[in-house]
Image (cartoon, rainbow, N blue to C red):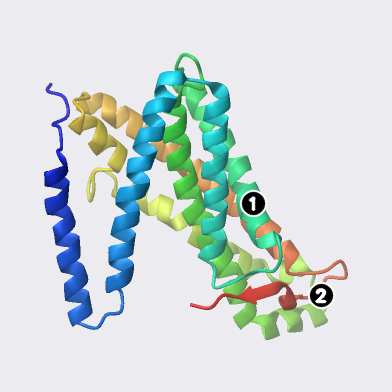
Amino acid sequence: MMGAIELPAWKLAIVASLVLMLGVLSHCLRLGIGKSLIIAGGRTFVQLSLVGLILESLFASTSPLWIALVALVMLLFAGREVMARQKRRLAGWWAYGIGTGVMFVSSFSVTIFALAVIGPTPWYSPQYAIPLLGMMLGNTMTGVALCLDRLTETAWQQRGVIESRLMLGETADSAIGDIRREAMRSGMMPAINAMAAAGIVSLPGMMTGQILAGTSPLLAVKYQILIMLTVTVGSGFGTVLAVVAGSHRLFDDRQRLRLDRLVTERR
């Protein structure tokens, strides 16, 4: 099979012009997203170009120290994105700490497990470790952000119901149990939908990239199955841990609902 076809800058510019056209159209329709669309497109170009340069150097050095540093930066930015995507977030460092801590535990552990299954040499080979961790963090970030947003928003909306159940003698875990389960489901649903639609509705990104690069479709499928299963595991465990930690933070030691620990983000 032939390798990937080179993409010169002028071809990317043609595609970028379509994004500009979409931005102009959204402005004409007064959708209010034209500026955000152009900025997001520019960030995509700049950020991915920088990542490409960094990965070129990283793949050449294979230094575990540099790999660990890149992984740490990815984790810290993912934690920031989780906090930014919540309408009502926990006040103080909890908003950042829960999301970042949960992703560290779930994403890093599952990534190490996936590397052990694949068996690259060395096991921390950046060609495998960084892309795997990136996919794991990205999907876990989405699940954690969704579940925490659902948890805090629903707890705020149903605060009267929760307090009534507490006054009737229920424990904090019981009073918020239904909300917690719904939050967990909402966090896991994107990964479940992705698995259900894979191969029928859409061809996943990693598989498509490998095929375009000349990899055998059957080998690309095997890698994609591995990735989707491990991503679902990481996202699922991360969602459960985030909801449990976040719901406990909504109550004090005397099992009183403490919504004053939430901060409403301006949109």
Kindly identify which residue carries mark 1.
Answer: 241
Question: Which residue is found at the position 12% from the left and 23% from the top?
Answer: 2
Q: Which picture quadrant has residue 22? A: bottom left
CA neighbours of label 1 inside 10 A, class few (<14), some (14 to 19), many (20+) = many
- x, y percent for residue 49: 32, 42
- x, y percent for residue 262: 67, 73
Kindly identify which residue carries mark 2.
Answer: 256
Question: Which residue is found at the position 21% from the left and 23% from the top?
Answer: 216
Question: Which residue is found at the position 73% from the left and 72% from the top?
Answer: 261
The local secondary structure at tag 1 comes to helix
Tell me the amino acid under the disc marked 2.
Arg
Q: Is residue 240 visible?
A: yes
- x, y percent for residue 64: 55, 23
Question: Which residue is found at the position 18% from the left and 55% from the top?
Answer: 16
Residue at the extreme right: 254
Q: Which picture quadrant has residue 258? A: bottom right
In the rendered image, the vertical position of residue 181 relative to residue 264, given as above or below: above
Seen from the viewer's position, the closer of residues 217 and 83 is 83
CA neighbours of label 2 inside 10 A, class few (<14), some (14 to 19), many (20+) = some
Seen from the viewer's position, the closer of residues 44 and 230 is 44
- x, y percent for residue 111: 52, 33
Q: How many marks?
A: 2
User: Which quadrant, please, contains the N terminus?
Assistant: top left
Using residue 51 as the reference point, say whether residue 122 is left or right of it: right
Q: Is residue 182 visible?
A: no
In the rendered image, the vertical position of residue 263 relative to residue 71, given as above or below: below
Using residue 159 as the reference point, say whether residue 39 is left or right of it: left
